[in-house]
Amino acid sequence: MSIFEFKGKIALVTGANRGIGEGYVRTLLNAGVKKVYAGARDLDNLSALIEQFPGKIEPVLLEVTSAEHIKALAEQIDSLDILVNNAGIADASGFIAANSVEVARQEMEVNYFAPLQITQAMLPLLRQSGQALIINISSIAGIANLPSIGPYSATKAAMHSYTQGLRAELKTDGIQVIGVYPGPIDTRMAEGFEMDKPKPEQVAIKTLEALEDEKIDVFPDDFSVHMYGLFLQHPHNLETAFSEMM
C-alpha cells in the first residue's frame, strides 16, 4: 500500500456541516486537497466553512437517504479521489424500548444503507482516480455493543463489516478503504456522555496520521484505543466494560 498523497485531490464529505464531518473538511483542505464537495441537508450551515476556505468548498444538498439527492450528486461531480462516509444519526435507545424497531430502521438507513448507496454511486469516479481513498466512519460501539445505544451500535457493526468487505473487493482496483472507530467525540451526538471528549478535528487528523503509517483501522482517541485494547485481550472484555457503563 503506497502512502496517500492528498495534494491536488478532490474529496466528498457527507455530513460536512458540523462535528466530525466539518473536521474532515478542514483537515483535508489543510493537507492540500484542492476541492471538497461538502454534503449537508442544510446548505446554510456551511456558510462559515465556505467563507474560511474561499473557492475550495462546493456545497452539495445531500439527504443521504434520498435516491434523488444521490443521483444528482453523481451528476454534479465529475472527478473524485476521496470519499468520506461520515453522515450519521444516533438515538439514545436500547433494543427493548417501545420504539426500538422504528429507531433501528431509521438508523440503519442513515448509518449503513446510505454509505453503501453513495459509495456505489461514486465508485465509477473513484476507479478513474490515479489514487483513491474511501474513509468509513464507524464507531468503537461497532466493535462491541454499547447497550445504552444498542441499535446504533448494530448499525456501526454493519459499517465495520461493510468496510472489511469493501476493502477486499476493491483491493484489485487499488482503492484504499479505511475504517475509523471513534469513541465519544465533542459533538452534538455525544452530548449525553459525561467524560472528557476530544475535538472532532482530532478524528480527521488521526486518520491522516494513520494513513502515513499505512494503517487501515483508526482508533483516533484515548477512549477508543483503550476499549479496543480490551477487545484484543478478549472480545467479552469489551462487551463487559460497555455493559457496566449502563
Image (cartoon, rainbow, N blue to C red):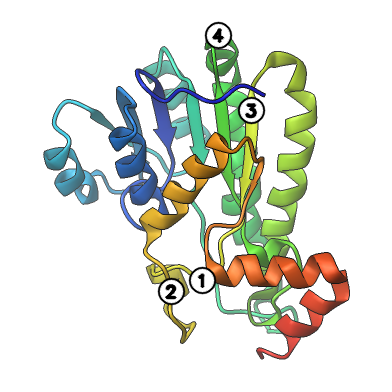
x then y, percent, for residue 151: 69, 69
Asked if labels 1 and 2 touch by Cβ distance under 8 angstroms, the answer is yes
Residue 201 sits in quarter? bottom left
Among all residues in the image, which is located at the extreme front? 213
Residue 102 is at least partly visible in this image: no
Instruction: State the residue in front, 179 or 7.
Output: 7
- In the rendering, which numbered label is found on residue 176? 3
Mark 3 Cα shell of 10 Å, populated few (<14), some (14-19), many (≥20): many
- In the picture of the structure, the residue carrying the numbered disc 1 is 184
Instruction: State the residue in front, 79 or 31.
Output: 31
Q: Residue at x 68, y 58 (%)?
A: 155
x then y, percent, for residue 117: 61, 34
Asked if labels 2 and 4 touch by Cβ distance under 8 angstroms, the answer is no
Instruction: Say which amino acid is labelled 2.
Output: Lys
x then y, percent, for residue 23: 35, 50
Decide which of tag 2 and tag 1 comes sooner along the chain: 1
The quadrant of the picture occupied by the N terminus is: top right
- In the picture of the structure, the residue carrying the numbered disc 4 is 128
Instruction: Say which amino acid is labelled 1.
Output: Pro
How far apart, in angstroms, are the residues tagged by discs 4 and 3?
14 Å
Instruction: Say which amino acid is labelled 3.
Output: Gln
SS label for mark 2: loop
